[in-house]
Image (cartoon, rainbow, N blue to C red):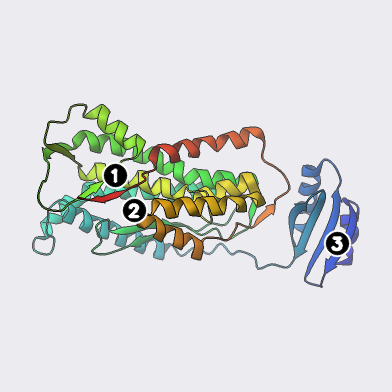
Amino acid sequence: MEEILNYLKTKMTVEDMSGGLTVAQVSGSLNPPVDRTIKDIKEYFSHTDYTPLFDSDGNRHIIKYGIFKKAVDNPKYWLNLLLFIATLFSTIFAGSLNSGGNPFKNSSDLWLGIPFSFSIMAILTCHEFGHYFVSRKAGMITTLPYFIPVPFHFIGTLGAVIRMKSIVPDRRSLLKVGMAGPLAGFLVALPIAIIGIALSEFRPAQQSAEFLKLGDSLLFWGLAKILHPNIPQGHDLFLHPIAFAGWLGFLVTSMNLIPIGQLDGGHIAYSIFFKKRRYMYVPIFAGMIALGFLWPGWIFWALLIFLFARRNAVIQDAITPLTSREKLLAVMPLLVFIFTFTPRPFIFW
């Protein structure tokens, strides 16, 4: 520790030091240019058992260094593959039921579920691999996607997740990793929605029995108006299974882009606003509770975020700010969020 402290004194004006033998904190002023100094300190620590974390408090720079558990890249591909196959079958089963088939009585009806299953799996897979490849490029240790099958559910899945097992190198990396998933998933969901809407057909509107109606995002509504400009009186547009997958892709994308917690939008917001992001919590939660009067699912989603997703990502270099160009990149997921957000996804008539 003494040798490390002596080295740090050559890289910064040390004002204070605290901590024990395994974790220490040094505060002061890093020598300019700060980004170059941080890079040099990282290089020095790479030859030791210690890991440095860089932060700031007002005009002071803070370096915490200690022996943290190293992330191990030990993938278990069999589990990822097993969950993928299970989710493929559960979504085929759900798609078959939604298309009027009955796989319980006739196994050949499973073919009816393939258009929906392959479409929604393509969206989810591209979303998660967008995160995976960008995080790997940034030098992070990240797992392959874990798909979540839900048998006998009308969608057949609760999506997929990946785990970031290592520290995020800097705010730039967090921004790009957070953006990559939603944008990749959206770029796949968009042509799927267009193809699906084009294949959808008009049927007489149901008048007596209660039925489920899907709400519209601005984008999905606009695509439907362009592809089917004239709706016959007394008829509704009944979505093709591929269109339903595209609609779900838009919904999942917008829900993930809510700028809070461990959601993709939360990572993007944290990379831009950093500690000031906490001021967004109250208005966002209040907005979600208000939306709960349109669809109760928003209250449930807000509760899940509050209970399980409030942690901030651990960033090694939290000092180096984003450039103006990098901040402008966040306009893309913001626009995607605005155009794919559905205030009332499910409506019972």
Q: Which element type, helix, strand or loop, lies under badge 1?
A: loop
Q: Is residue 49 above or below residue 117?
A: below
How crowded pointer 3 is (Cα within 10 Å; few <14, some 14-19, many 20+) is rated as some
Residue pictured at 72% horizontal, 44% vertical? 320
Q: Is residue 215 above or below residue 103?
A: above
Q: Mark 1 points at which residue?
A: 215
**Quarter of the image where one finds residue 222:** top left
Which amino acid type is shown beneath numbered disc 3? Ile
Q: Name the residue under label 3.
A: 4
Q: Which element type, helix, strand or loop, lies under badge 2?
A: loop
- Residue extending furthest bottom? 21
Q: Is residue 98 left or right of residue 161?
A: left
**Image depth: mark 3 or mark 1 in front:** 1
Picture coordinates of residue 279, whole percent (x, y) = 61, 51
Q: How far apart are marks 3 and 2 (CA)?
A: 56 Å
Disc 1, disc 2: CB below 8 Å? yes
Picture coordinates of residue 106, whole percent (x, y) = 9, 60
Image mark for residue 295:
2
How crowded pointer 1 is (Cα within 10 Å; few <14, some 14-19, many 20+) is rated as some
Which amino acid type is shown beneath numbered disc 2? Trp
Q: Which element type, helix, strand or loop, lies under badge 3?
A: helix
Can residue 220 be seen here?
Answer: yes
Can residue 170 be seen here?
Answer: no
Q: How far apart are marks 1 and 2 (CA)?
A: 10 Å
Q: In the rendered structure, which disc, 3 or 1, sits on the residue that comes first in sequence?
A: 3
**Image depth: mark 3 or mark 2 in front:** 2
